[in-house]
Amino acid sequence: MSLDELQTEMELLGEKKFRAGQIYQWLHQKLAGSFDEMTNLPASLRARLDEEYVCALPEPVRHLKSAVDGTEKYLFRLPDGNVIESVLMRYHHGNSVCISTQAGCRMGCRFCASTLGGLARNLSPSEMLGQVYQIQKITGERVSHLVAMGTGEPLDNYDNFLKFIRLLTNEKGLNISQRNVTASTCGIVENIRRLADEKLQITLALSLHAPTQEKRQKLMPVAHRYELNEVLDACRYYFKKTGRRVTFEYSLAEGVNDSDADADLLAALIGGLEGHVNLIPINPVTERSYVQSRAKRV
Ligand code: SF4
């Protein structure tokens, strides 16, 4: 809940309005995982909240740490049994968490393992926040950056994702700068345009992955719904409205989209656009046949 919603809730419970501020601080700054921890609330109120509301962080069930660069991967279990992944990356500019926005995904990108079982359900704003809060709590280190590039398509869960961004960047919460937030999308055109109109300062990352409509359709079923030109027009609109350069994600698969001709087509396609290209050697997925491009090719 936003602070306003919490205040309304307190009024409905016949409580003083200032209680909302206390609870908000417990939830979003002290990262409480239960009402019991909210020790400046009367015991009677805590008991009532416990009966009528839910305050819970996702339960960590597995944790992996890379021996190469210290990147940490968390598997969290949600109350309904779904499990989701989040990743912590430490950079010189701060700690960045990559969150999931859905349990599963229905977008069907051919190179992606997260979509193999389809979409289970959307995550709520609190389940997205919970991944960040839990990681900050476990490590004891401040999270300063966020990328929504884990499982799920954030713009396929638009309202929850937007509410999450507003809570995450709220000055009474973790107060992460909007400029440190990146939303990655496979290209849901109408929602890129909607996002552009929200007056946010977050970065948009478009999963482009191919320089032509034909090739993109082979890699990403969503490309059957939107023409490449429509998607790029929406990116231009995003830059125009926000002044934020778009990042173009380009996963490289050997012999698929990594030829010199592909590079030339890519340059011609987005050359005039304010943006960055992020080249990513594809992560091989057992169920698919794609092979990572060699370093020299990248
Ligand atoms: S939108 Fe993202 S999570 Fe969904 S299938 Fe595509 S790459 Fe995977």
Image (tube, rainbow, N blue to C red):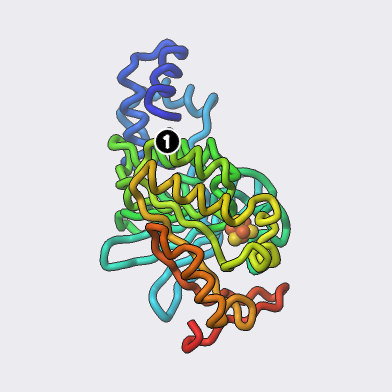
Quadrant position of ligand 1: bottom right
Left or right, 111 with respect to 196, comes to right
Q: Is residue 147 above or below residue 201?
A: below
Q: Amino acid at mark 1?
A: Glu
Which residue does the image show at 26% across and 67% down from the upper left? 92
Q: Residue at coordinates 50% horizontally, 38% vertically from top-left?
A: 194
Depth check: 200 or 147 in front?
A: 200
What SS does tag 1 mark?
loop
Q: Give whichever of 59, 108 is nearer the camera.
A: 108
Category of crowding for the residue at label 1, using alpha-carbon neighbours closer than 10 angstroms: few (below 14), some (14–19), many (at least 20): few
Determine if residue 31 is in view.
Answer: no
Q: Please, is residue 65 above or below residue 20 in the view?
A: below
In the displayed structure, does residue 52 sit left or right of residue 215? left
Q: Which residue is mark 1?
A: 198
**Residue 227 % position (x, y):** 63, 53
Q: Nearer the viewer, residue 4 or 283?
A: 283
The quadrant in which the N terminus is found is: top left
Quarter of the image where one finds residue 258: bottom right
| Residue 107 in view | yes
Residue at (32% x, 43% y) in the render: 174
Which x, y percent locates residue 282? 56, 74
Instruction: Residue at 30%, 19% (x, y): give it.
Output: 18
Is residue 4 found left or right of 104 in the rendered image? left
| Image quadrant in which you'd find residue 251 | bottom right
Question: Looking at the picture, how far across and down is residue 250, in whole percent?
Answer: 52, 68
Figure disc tally:
1
- Residue 152 location (% of width, % of height): 59, 53
